[in-house]
Image (spheres, rainbow, N blue to C red):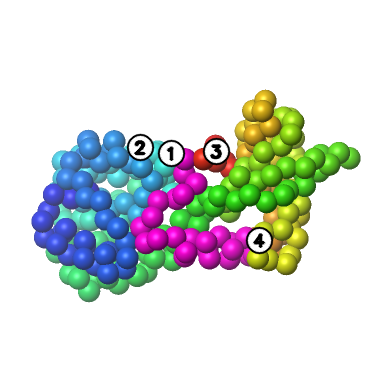
Amino acid sequence: MSGDASVVRVLRPTLEKLSIAVEICQEAEKASEILISEKFDAVIIDCDDVQGGLEVLQCLRATPSNRNSIAFAVLNGKKTTTQEAFGMGVNFVLQKPISSLNASRCFHAALSFMERERRRYFRHPLKMPVKVVLEEKELKATSTNISERGIALMLHHAIPKNANPRLHFMLPETKMALEIEAEVAWADLKGHAGLRFLKVPQSSQELLEKWLSERIEKLPGGAENPAASSPSAIQ
């Protein structure tokens, strides 16, 4: 979010060279509306030279879709201090005038954070058999999507909303069976349910993260999450 042509002239090509699609907004009110309705890997806010910019930054962490997005504050050196920006939850600060070299260094440093957040948020559509163990009872289910934090399932019968089942499944193209303790995040009477992972063995977590990262890499550049319109694993 910036109306400063010199900022846009430097930042836009720097981001595009990193294969990062850019959406530009010049007004704080419009930016707030967009942040409520859309998900971004990173949010760059010209805090000092856009009216209401500081308020957008302060409210960023309250937006459901972008509270964990990587946040950049662009400061002019006269109003907001670096310390104040970090106190409002900013991850990186860019001081005007911004050079291409400084911007490039900053975004390269931020890439690993952005990729980690994208993987955490990413839901991969996946149909595979899942065994759901409830105390002494075993239920057969089919997954609809999976994320780093949970899985969405279809069962023949509704699952109790207070259940804490153990899940057994094997990801496609892998050879290791996963056993994960979970809790029901949401469920309906038709047998659809979203389960949140609770206790994931380290080896299973590493495998799941690697498997999801490989699926993200196969997406077309800048593509939206293909599972975004399907029932989510976590709501």
Q: Is residue 117 left or right of residue 185?
A: left
Q: Residues within 10 Å of mark 4 (few under 14, many from 20)?
A: few
Outermost residue, right direction?
136
- The residue indicated by pointer 4 is 172
Could you give the CA–CA distance between mark 3 and mark 4, rounded to whole angstroms?
21 Å
Of labels 4 and 2, earlier in sequence is 2
Q: Position of residue 139 (x, y in %)?
A: 80, 40
Is residue 209 on the magenta stretch? Answer: yes
Residue 135 drawn at (x, y percent): 85, 39
- First in sequence, mark 3 or 1: give its number: 1
Q: Who comes first in sequence, dot 3 or dot 4?
A: 4
The residue pinned by badge 1 equals 64
- Residue 36's disc is 2
Residue sitting at x 55%, y 41%: 232
Q: Which residue is mark 3?
A: 231
Q: Which image quadrant for residue 176?
A: bottom right
Say which of 120 and 170 sits in front.
Answer: 170
| Label 4 element class | loop
- Residue at image position (65%, 65%) is 173
Between the residue at mark 3 and the residue at mark 1, the CA separation in whole angstroms equals 17 Å
| Marks 3 and 2, the one that precedes in the sequence | 2
